[in-house]
Amino acid sequence: MPEPTPRLLRAVRSAMGERPVWDAELPLGPLAGAAMPKTVINGTWDTAHPDHREFTGTALMACGAYLAGAIGARHVRVPGAGHAPHQDRPDEVNALLARLWES
């Protein structure tokens, strides 16, 4: 359990006011039809506790694979990253984004 610092408590307050993710309506049709390169990035969750990986990581990796297939995107799994690959492995994610934007 992380230390409840003022920064983390502020983040929790913000998150508690957000809409639940399952309320989101994603326009998969227009995304699939868009003539631009697309990439979906997931962590591999290999550094997470096995129970957390099984309960959360497996579901989120499946969502990433589904989304990539649904919109015709490349699906990349970043080793050493969990829920937030952009924070866990910014070097890898930034390189992926640079290659995507160059294409």
Image (cartoon, rainbow, N blue to C red):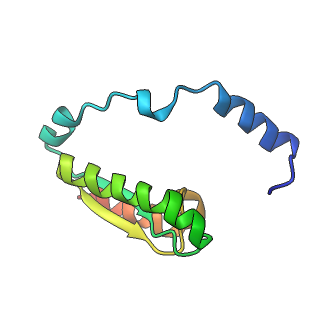
Compared with residue 47, is residue 30 higher up or lower down, i.e. above or below?
above
| Rendered location of residue 67, percent (x, y) | 28, 49
**Left of 18 or right of it: where is 4?**
right
Residue 40 lies in what quarter of the image?
A: bottom left
Say whether residue 29 is visible: yes
**Left of 48 or right of it: where is 44?**
left
User: What residue lies at 39% left-to-right and 60% top-to-bottom?
Assistant: 61
User: What residue lies at 49% left-to-right and 61% top-to-bottom?
Assistant: 57
**Left of 99 or right of it: where is 80?**
right
| Rendered location of residue 41, percent (x, y) | 39, 58
Compared with residue 10, is residue 52 higher up or lower down, i.e. above or below?
below
| Rendered location of residue 74, percent (x, y) | 24, 60
User: What residue lies at 30% left-to-right and 55% top-to-bottom?
Assistant: 39
* Closer to the camera in the image, 11 or 94: 11
Quarter of the image with the N terminus in it: bottom right
Marks counted in the figure total 0
User: What residue lies at 22% left-to-right and 36% top-to-bottom?
Assistant: 28
* Closer to the camera in the image, 43 or 20: 20
* Closer to the camera in the image, 54 or 103: 54
| Rendered location of residue 13, percent (x, y) | 74, 30
Quarter of the image with the C terminus in it: bottom left
Residue 7 lies in what quarter of the image?
A: top right
Residue 95 lies in what quarter of the image?
A: bottom left
Say whether residue 85 is visible: no
